[in-house]
Amino acid sequence: HLLSRRPLLLNRVLLRQNPHNVGEWLRRASLYQKLLKEEKKERRRAASDADAEAPAAKDAHNWWHHYIQDAILALEESVSKVHSRQAINGNPASLWMELAKLHESNPPAKAASDDDDEEKDATNDGGGGGGIEGARSIYRRVCIDRTYRFKSTDDAAQVWCSWVEMELRHDCFDEALSVIRQAVANTPNTKGGLHKSLRLWNLALDLEESLGGFENTRASYDRVIELGVATPQIIRNYASYLKQHTHHEQSYTVYERGLELFPFPHLGALVLWTEYLTNFEERYGGSKLERLRDLYERCLDPETSPSQDDISNFYIRYAKLEEQYGLSKRALSVYERMCTAILSSPSKRISYELYISKATQFLGGGSGLSKIRPIYETAISSLDDLDAAKICLSYAALETKLGELDRARTVYTYGAQMADPRRFDGYWKEWHSFEVKRGSEDTFRDMLRIKRAVSAAFSTVNYNAAEMTADDADDQKNNAKSLTDAEAIAMITKQEGIQPKRPTIGGFVTGKRGADDAGLEVLERQAARLRGAGVNVGSGGDGDAVAHVSKSAAVTVNADAGEIDLDDGTDEEDDDDDDVNASSTAVTNVEMKHVPAGVFGGLAAGSATESQGTVPTMGALARLQASKATDSNNTYVNYD
């Protein structure tokens, strides 16, 4: 017994975790009904195996009653605990419908006189419910008394529809009609916009057409339109209902009301206009032609016209109406308006071809065909190149038919500029055939010349377009990541296989000196360069260092290092021209000012030792003479 109740126990655990789980409540009710079915099978098996002399128990007539009661109690508990805004795994309306269905399928148990009748009731009815009256009481509680508040109006409408369907199943048609009328009635007790539910109104209109009278049905349809809940299908049903009852003018009025609710570009307007025009034309034909023309003019009004995909159908119908009941001139004007109204290129060309064919049909042969020329000219000027070239072929064929060979050749020449030989080879075949049959050697040669020119023009245009497309793609690719100067130089170096030189400007220093440039090491390097270039450093009588630059030394500016270089003219790469330029730019006989000995520090004393072999060593006599010359003349000593 415990294992058989295991699903119920697990279900109870889930409902304790979340009492708003609609699916689990419905499963609990189905579990009780499943236990009832299993009990029926066991009793049938026991009855077939038992002896005929063993009577059933006296209390066996109510053995099934507790299963149905448990299912009903489970659903009653569910509708009291499940909140509509917190419900999950189902719709709370399904709980009420399932509860009403249990009462409907299980009528009240009847007292039986013997055990066999009791067993028969248990087998057929399932026992222990309220029947249809019990189901009605459930629906009244939720629909009329409003003991439960649904989240949306559609949930409540589902319960109302379920009530009506139950009445129809039991052939209670008057009760069903009364219930649905009560559902859509706009009364003070009506809340939540239930009287505007499209689900209820669709069911109500079906019942009114089937069970109600003509006036009640009309009133219901008018009520739907007034409330603004009508759909294009409801408008069509209303008009069809009136047409079946031979109220044609009233059906046209319904179409007019529907078109006010659903004008273009609503998709319903296309269906309503099509049916409206079809029914009116079938009814009156050409007897009310002016009224029908007004309808077409309203339908094709530029401010409220159909879409480009559907407008051609209305124009063709309008033109056919004029062909059948009106004038051919008006029909041609309708075709002309169609060609102007259509904007898409393929449909526009087809409309012009239809216009030309109808004009050819109505204007007849002979001189009347000459009146079609303006149509061709208008078509060629308004179409794209490819479509215009096709129209040119038709135009040239017309001129050929009229015997105007020069005009036909002119048309071929004009259309050639729009016909790419690679894409539209048929155009050139037609022209080739024309020149072979009716042309001369000169005209044929002109045709070939024009073909070559057009081929070259189209090939050039396509090549430039492809090139521009490639350039745009390269620009997009390059713009995807902006390169710095260093990255650009590195990329060029890699591609070209060269090492680019850093650009310099003579006479300017490219970078600022660092803090270490003012140190002793820099000064020592400068002194070494001066000594290596032939600069003599000495000491005067007052301890100042005296520097002299030889006449052959040239002064240059190193832009990279920001220092002064002295060119001694010993480069091996100098040629005669370089010598001339060097002599013209060299600075000679430069006299230097006194350099304080404190600047060089110990360099002045050790300069002779450090620069052996470069500057000649001065003896004591030479130093004494130099000192006297400095004191007496106060001039620089120049050792040449």
Image (cartoon, grey):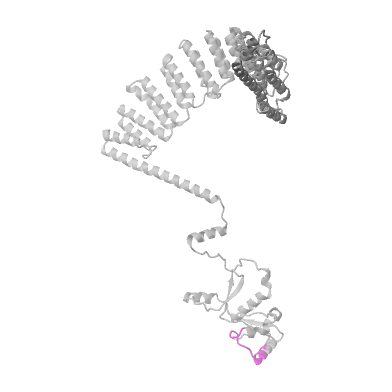
Quadrant containing the N terminus is top right
Is residue 614 a member of the stretch shown in magenta? yes
Q: Nearer the viewer, residue 244 or 521?
A: 244
Residue at 62% from the left image edge and 21% from the top image edge: 38
Residue at 68% from the left image edge and 72% from the top image edge: 518
Count of numbered circles on the image:
0
Residue 570 placement, left or right of 432: right
Tell me if I can see residue 164 in this picture. Answer: no
Check the image and report above or below for 317 versus 561: above
Quadrant of residue 483 in the image?
A: bottom right
Check the image and report above or below for 470 versus 559: above
What x and y, as percent, mark residue 173? Answer: 61, 9
Q: Nearer the viewer, residue 75 or 122?
A: 122
Quadrant of residue 368 in the image?
A: top left
Q: Which region shows up in magenta?
A: 611-626
Is residue 483 a member of the stretch shown in magenta? no
Check the image and report above or below for 448 versus 43: below
What x and y, as percent, mark residue 13? Answer: 71, 30
